[in-house]
Image (spheres, rainbow, N blue to C red):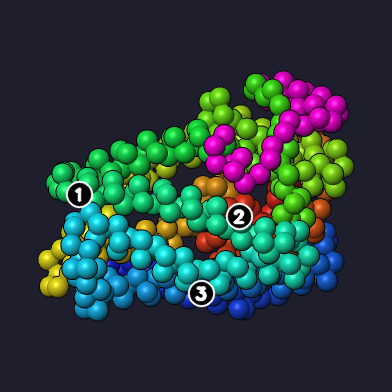
Amino acid sequence: MNYLWLGLIVLAGAFCALYLKSALYPGPINPSALRYFSTEQAHSARAYSFVPRVLFITSFMLQASVLSWLVFSRKGATIARRVEVRCGHYWRSILMYFFLLWLFLRLLRLPFTLFGNYYWQQAWGFSTQTLAAWWLDYTKSAALDLFLATFGVLLFFAILKHWPKIWWVIGATLFAVWLVLQNFLWPVIVSPMFNHFEPAKNPAVISMVKDLANKAGIQVDEVLVMDASRRTTMANAYFMGLGTTKQIVIYDNLLENYPLDEVEAVLAHEMGHWQKGHIIQGLSLGVVGAFLSWGLLALYLSKLRPTAGHHRLQLWASVQLFLLLIMMVTNPIQNYISREMEKQADQVSLELTGDSAAVVRLQINLAAKNLSDVSPPGFIVWFGYTHPPVLSRIEAMGDY
């Protein structure tokens, strides 16, 4: 095994060990959290968070182990050769190897996904879905993933075949274009496949949106309400899209179960993302990251080609392993940027509403009802949190 690959695997393994240690031994509850939450709430939230954390890291380690075996073992090369012999045709063998690997990894992840996303949510009273409805969502998601991945693998090998020296530049460019298209099209093509959206009809909410948009200096014609309650009792909201597809989406159960001043704080937060241009910033960073990742991918794959017995079909397993590992080791960077954007949106929310009490109450109610860990281990926050932990967000209100 080349030292570059070994270094990446060791670094990812170190992160796994630290994450697992933090999940198993999270330490005592921060006394400051008990100013806002009961001891029972804090321990319940920690118990709820424990299983998803262990499932996440176990699933990652299992996938990384299997892919490493397929990439670096002689048996992995033998499997690739057998696929090519049976299929004969170049493109047919690529598609067959890709499909077998895609299916195997899907089946490998399925127990973790099913337990974590359905049974665990049912056990804690969050899921409102039937098992049949969950399977329908899963099937649609898998079909979409298979369609996009099939297109991706064919494009990857076509570029590699026709432009062997600059394939990574072309690949990175096309991926950057895809990032833009994805951000533009996802809200209007993919999201409606899974949920129903309609404009908010509550006159108080409509008036609130107009007032907040005027204060923020942005053009927001409407806020969409998503039928999240048919899947979960958890409340949330988000902002996504580009240009004419920009959307602020709020869960129906947030509108139904939270007072209007807290709904206003949520809307102001999402408008903060809009005002600060976080989608464009994230997209720009994604494009830079794409070129860096594809350049590194080219470097890492070049270290495999001279390896004795390495079969060309194994390149796809190598790509999957690289992406899995690079996502793991860059997770802290991506999530740090995300947390900083969330802090900025929190600040805008406070500026637009002028109601720090409502913003704080919102954070407390969301954390209590969604069972967010109110005293998460520091490493898990640094490594895996896209948002600042609730206590940090509450305490930051005093700084604004």
- Kindly identify the residue that appears in the image at 64 percent across and 22 percent down: 218
Circle 3 or circle 2, nearest the eye: 2
Image vertical order of residue 6 relative to residue 128, above or below: below
Task: Please tell me which residue lies in front, 130 or 220.
Answer: 130
Image vertical order of residue 17 relative to residue 357, above or below: below
Circle 2 or circle 1, nearest the eye: 2
Give whichever of discs 2 and 1 has the lower sequence position: 2
Q: Are marks 2 and 1 in contact (CB under 8 Å)?
A: no
Residue 92: which quarter of the image? bottom left
> Magenta residues, as a range?
188-217
Image vertical order of residue 344 relative to residue 68, above or below: above
Residue 115: which quarter of the image? bottom right
Task: Please tell me which residue lies in front, 214 or 147.
Answer: 147
Give whichever of discs 3 and 1 has the lower sequence position: 3
Q: Amino acid at mark 1?
A: Leu
Mark 2 element type: helix
Q: Amino acid at mark 2?
A: Asp
- Kindly identify the residue that appears in the image at 81 percent across and 67 percent down: 41
Local packing at callout 1 (Cα closer than 10 Å; few below 14, some 14-19, many 20+) is some
Q: Which residue is mark 2?
A: 137
Checking the image for residue 58, the label placed there is 3
Q: Which residue is mark 1?
A: 160
Q: Amino acid at mark 3?
A: Thr
Circle 3 or circle 1, nearest the eye: 1
- Kindly identify the residue that appears in the image at 68 percent across and 40 percent down: 196
Local packing at callout 2 (Cα closer than 10 Å; few below 14, some 14-19, many 20+) is some
